[in-house]
Amino acid sequence: MGDLRVGVIGCGGHAQNHFSMIKNEPRMELVAVAEVDSDRLQKAQVDHQPQFIFTDFRQMLDQVDLDLVYVVTMPGHLLPIVLECLGRDLHTSIEKSPGMNPKEARQMLDVAQQSKGLAIVSLNRRYKPEVLAVRKLLQERGGAIQVSANYHKPPSGLRQPGLREVAPPEIICDAIHHVDLLRWMSGRTPTEAAQATEVYAHSWHGDREGTPRYNAIMALDTECKQQKFMPKTCRLI
């Protein structure tokens, strides 16, 4: 039996990676899952064999003693679930992006700062071996002076009906990984990401539907000047 009793909310495609990680982590025990789609819920029960299954996440939180909850839903569904979990002092891991807009992200952050539970956003690109290796080299040589990145993506369907109600624009939903990597590469210490002190940004529509452009220059508290380029879907300079 693991040290951490785990619940998972949402059993879609992204959740499968979390299920695999939980299975392979001896310190964790999958205790319960919650999913509104009955077919997904039944499949999760067969494939991952949690002790309990629920169609209502609040019932799961009320009836099962948990230490940690993975909230693996679309961004538009996150806010009430995350606030409920952190309000119960549960350790809470969520998928990017943290909500539909900065206001929702701020609400989650405010509650997280008051909670006894830890909160994390799954910005997993930080921990790729090649990223960690480059970051180590940067720190050994005194830290970054300038960091830039390119983000290329085919035309996006995020603005289509059915998705735009639950997924934010590309700059938030997708490019958040690359913005986070720029901050991470510029951090002062092995565990610290740099914070933006100034941001100059501009956006405009591309030539085709689903090809917005974004430009930004960020100044960081590490005195590193960051540039980000996303020529197709997103572009930050």
Image (cartoon, rainbow, N blue to C red):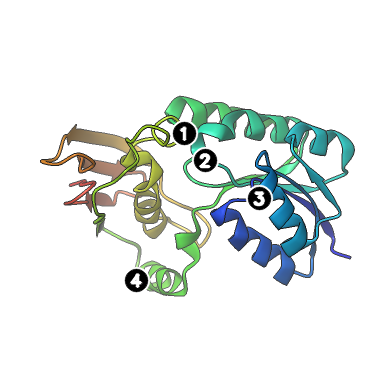
Q: Earlier in the sequence, mark 4 or mark 3?
A: 3
Distance from the alpha carbon under mark 4 to that under mark 1:
43 Å
Q: Nearer the viewer, mark 4 or mark 2?
A: 2
The answer to whether 233 is drawn above or below residue 134 in the figure is above
Distance from the alpha carbon under mark 4 to that under mark 2:
40 Å
In the image, taking residue 165 as reference, residue 8 lies left or right, namely: right
Residue 40: give its label. Answer: 3
Q: Nearer the viewer, mark 4 or mark 3?
A: 3
* Residue indicated by mark 4: 141
Q: Nearer the viewer, mark 4 or mark 1?
A: 1
Task: Determine the secondary structure under disc 3.
Answer: helix
Task: Determine the secondary structure under disc 2.
Answer: loop
Residue 166: give its label. Answer: 1
Q: Furthest-left residue in view?
A: 207
Compare residues 123 and 9 and report the one nearer the observer: 9
In the image, taking residue 72 as reference, residue 3 lies left or right, namely: right
The residue type indicated by label 4 comes to Arg
Distance from the alpha carbon under mark 2 to that under mark 1:
6 Å
The residue type indicated by label 1 comes to Val
Q: Earlier in the sequence, mark 2 or mark 3?
A: 3
Could you tell me which residue is drawn at 54 percent across and 52 percent down?
122
| Residue 128 drawn at (x, y percent) | 47, 69
The number of numbered discs placed on residues in the rendered structure image is 4
- In the rendered image, which quarter is residue 119 located in? top right
* Residue indicated by mark 2: 74
Q: Nearer the viewer, mark 3 or mark 1?
A: 3
The residue type indicated by label 2 comes to Met
Task: Determine the secondary structure under disc 4.
Answer: loop
The residue type indicated by label 3 comes to Arg
